[in-house]
Image (cartoon, rainbow, N blue to C red):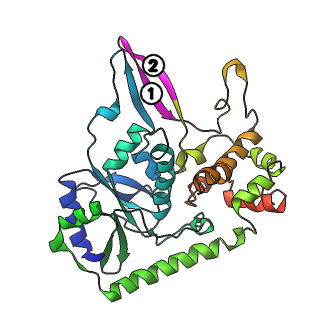
Amino acid sequence: MAFFASFSDFWGLLEKWAQEKPVYVVRYISDNLHYQKFTAETRDGIVYDEIRAVEPLKSFFFKIKQRVAEYPVSYSESGKAETEFIIVGAKACDLRSMEILDETFMRGEIKDPFYVERRKKGIIITSDCSSPKETCFCTLLSLKPYPEKGFDLNLSKISEGVILEVGSERGERLLSQGKELLSQASPSQLEGRNKNREVTLSKVKEQNEKFALSKPYRELIKEKFDSSVWGKYSGRCLECAACLSVCPTCHCFLLYDQKVGEGFEKVRVWDFCYYRGYARVGGGTNARPTGKDRIKNKYIKKFEFYMSKFGMYACTGCGRCIEACLANIDMRQVFKDLEAGQSSNNM
């Protein structure tokens, strides 16, 4: 079911929604796209299509820092009533990341109450990509630069406005609040949307032709476990973990206790396997003592372990890691070098 709204009518919808719950939209801040809370001041300059925001979608659901317990008083943030919120402008790559995080935090034997609660309250309105960067490689992972499932609503920008496709009952309820602002999407409007999608899809495919592999990532990782390429790239890696910070699927965390007043609190923060002390245990033993061990672990986890356990790669091809890397390490080139059994000429 698809509806059409002019840009001004869609603003009207956003205003209606924002009266009841927080709404986050994508806007340019210092030449980069970021999520901002929708207000009268942020109404202008909303970006509907283009590319994913700098922040991964996980930051709404898996907080960077979170208090999870308090002593001696029993405390849990999961006991607090979370309010519903709306995210507008998430892309297909980030939507796929939520499937990956759901497997980790929601569908296993042990469920994360904080993630589950936020997931229930978050309404996701995705949008098509129209301006992929050279770093985007979703098509190498059999994904497309536009959402096909898993969204509450999907927004597709066309010349005269936006097409809103319903993907869930929650999305249908949202649109019911502004029926007078909507009309049924016409065949010509849907055709325009589909043409835009084909243009973007072709662009992403074309720019990634040189990174195509002869075999699946998982097989290559297993075959090249002892490759010297790992050492070549670890020699460049600064271990800053920027790539893991912006990765939409990385989900490692650290728990620590700290004194607060007369009591203590337990805090959870994001943690990263690139850190030298990540795998260190009592007595100083470290399962991954070298940079080579740590960089290889990242690829094994994303492309072998996760596939064997959940049937999907823990990578969405968003390209954030490539943009964030201070050493200019491109994940796509790492795989090409593994396949060739050599280091990159650009290293």
Describe the element under mark 2 as helix, strand or loop: strand
Whole-number angstrom distance, CA of label 1 to CA of label 2: 8 Å
Q: From the viewer's perspective, is 109 left or right of 127? A: right
* Residue marked by disc 2: 258
| Quadrant (top left, top right, bottom left, bottom right) of the N terminus | bottom left
The one of 338 and 346 positioned closer to us in this rendering: 338
**Residue 9 point in image, percent of width and height:** 21, 71
**Residue 108 point in image, percent of width and height:** 49, 44
Segment colored magenta: 255-271
The one of 236 and 143 positioned closer to us in this rendering: 143
Tell me the kind of residue under disc 2: Gln
Secondary structure mostly seen in the magenta stretch: strand
> Furthest residue to the left?
180
The one of 36 and 77 positioned closer to us in this rendering: 77
Where residue 161 sits, quadrant-wise, is bottom left
Residue under the point 81% across and 52% down: 229
Tell me the kind of residue under disc 1: Val
**Residue 276 point in image, percent of width and height:** 68, 32
Q: Can you tell which mark lies on residue 267?
A: 1
Residue under the point 36% across and 83% down: 190
Describe the element under mark 1 as helix, strand or loop: strand
**Residue 36 point in image, percent of width and height:** 34, 52
> Furthest residue to the top?
262
Asked if residue 191 is among those painted magenta in the image, a careful observer would answer no
